[in-house]
Structures are given as C-alpha cells and as structure tokens.
Image (tube, rainbow, N blue to C red):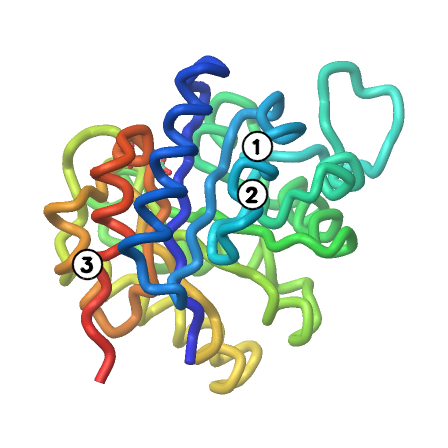
Amino acid sequence: MRKKIVAGNWKMNLTREQGTILISEVVNMVHDEVNSRVQVVLCMPFPYLGFAKKLFQSQANIALGAQNCHEKPAGAYTGEVSAPILRSFEVDYVILGHSERREYFKETDAVLAEKVRQVLANGMTPIFCCGESLELRQSGDYIGFVKQQLTDGLFHLSAEDFGKIVIAYEPIWAIGTGLTASAEQAQEMHAALREHIAAHYGAAVASHTTLLYGGSCNAKNAPELFACPDVDGGLIGGASLKSREFVNICKSFPAQG
Ligand code: PGA
C-alpha cells in the first residue's frame, strides 16, 4: 500500500505568530478528524524549523518539512542551509526542485540530483517536484518533458534509494493560478510517470512510489483528484495557509474498502 501524503508548502508566508496559530489549529483538527494513515507534512520557512516540531510532536502523523536545502554538506555558502543542518533540527521531508526554485533560483536537474543525494544521505525524504509550463503543455510533448525531469533529477539513484523518494507533479500553469489540472489530466500524467518509473526500476518500485499532485488544489477539488488511482495525495500551497481548508484536504481521500 502506498503512503498517502498531504504536504503543505507555506512558501514565504506567515510571521511567527501567524504560523504558530496555524500549527496549533492544524494539530488539533488533524488529531480529531484525520485518518492516522494519512501522513501530513508541514513545509515551513527555515526559522520555524527550530521550534515548530515540538508543537506537533504529540501527533504522530504530522511531520516537519523544509522547502529547500543546499547541495553541499557544509562550507562557505552564506545564507544557505545544508541537509545535515536540517536533519539536526529533526526535519523529516525536504521539498526539492519546486518550479519557483527552478525559475527564480535557476536550479537545474543536475543540481537537484545533488540535493536529492544530500537529503537522502541525511535520512530525510525528498519531495521532488516536476511539471511543465503552459507553453510545453500546449506544444504537446508535456509528458516527455516531465519524464525527462525525473530521469535527470532522480534516475541516478539506486532502486533502494529511489524507493525513499516522494514525487510531486505540479503543472506550472496550475500553481497559484486557480487553474487546477482536471482529474483526467492529473491521472494521465501520474500514470505516465509511474510507467516511466516501472520501465527503469521495475513494477514493484513504481507501485510503491507516492505521487502527489500540486497546483491550486483545494478542499473542493481534492476529493476528485485524490480519487484518481495514481494520485496519492497533494502538495498544497495557498490552501495550506488556512487550517480548515488544509485539514479538509487531508480528509479528501476516498474511504478504504
Ligand atoms: P498552490 O501551490 O496550491 O498555491 O497552487 C502549490 C505549490 O506551489 O506547491
């Protein structure tokens, strides 16, 4: 059975007081309402990582996430944060290769491959983001493009290490725009990515890989998206800043038979 995950990506939002209130609301609602098999991840700005975990330590299915890390383990990189530092603050998950980082910080798949290595070497789980622009979608070969992102960013890994990765498909045209991929569009891509993984690592690894959808996902569209056979949860931006909305998304998986 694949892990079901809902990860909130706060991006560069919320001051300490606002974030602390959000965490405590989410913790209480997750405790009361969310199936304990759903893994909730809160990916926060770096300054939170020093104190946030103790706010939800009592809640076993909430994990701490960062939004990036540097590709080197230590050194003279002013302003950067390494994977060993993150691990020492008990971070569990690290978002890597978000399209905003690829675009604004020029992160390439080659650099991302190094970051993935660092995160794994320090015992954390990468949430590796991929996804095509609107131009690519319209050009037709959007599936080939996203498959190539996986090949370049991840396929250097052994099957054992690949088995520790979470992938988030986030079409750039759907991020923060209110334009969600339809359930059919999400399923088409997720199925293609799973096949691509199977072709490289075999069917067993592919069927165990958690594939999240991200891009204007909210409590209204999540049930349809999460009902797709190859969609195992979501990476949530804007809607993760509102406790009620976010927790409702965490409750959007179809009932298990
Ligand atoms: P959004 O962002 O939910 O605000 O579209 C998703 C993301 O960028 O991870």
Disc number lying in front (1 or 3): 1
In three-dimensional space, the C-alpha distance between marks 1 and 2, rounded to whole angstroms, equals 8 Å
Disc number at residue 127?
Answer: none
Amino acid type, label 3: Leu
**Looking at the image, which is closer to me, 64 or 123?**
64
If the image is split into quadrants, where does the N terminus sit? bottom left
**Secondary element at image label 2:** strand
Q: In the rendered structure, which disc, 2 or 3, sits on the residue that comes first in sequence? A: 2
Q: Which residue is mark 2?
A: 64
Relative image position of residue 182 (x, y in whole percent):
13, 53
Q: Quadrant of residue 26?
A: top left
| Residue under the point 54% across and 34% down | 67
Nearer the observer: mark 1 or 2; the answer is: 1
Of badges 2 and 3, the one in the foreground is 2
Work out whether residue 222 can be spotted: yes
Q: Residues within 10 Å of mark 1 (few under 14, many from 20)?
A: some
Q: Nearer the viewer, residue 223 or 255?
A: 255
Q: Which amino acid lies under the numbered mark 2 shown in the image of this protein?
A: Leu
Measure the alpha-carbon separation of dots 1 and 3: 30 Å
Could you tell me residue 47's position as x and y percent?
61, 21
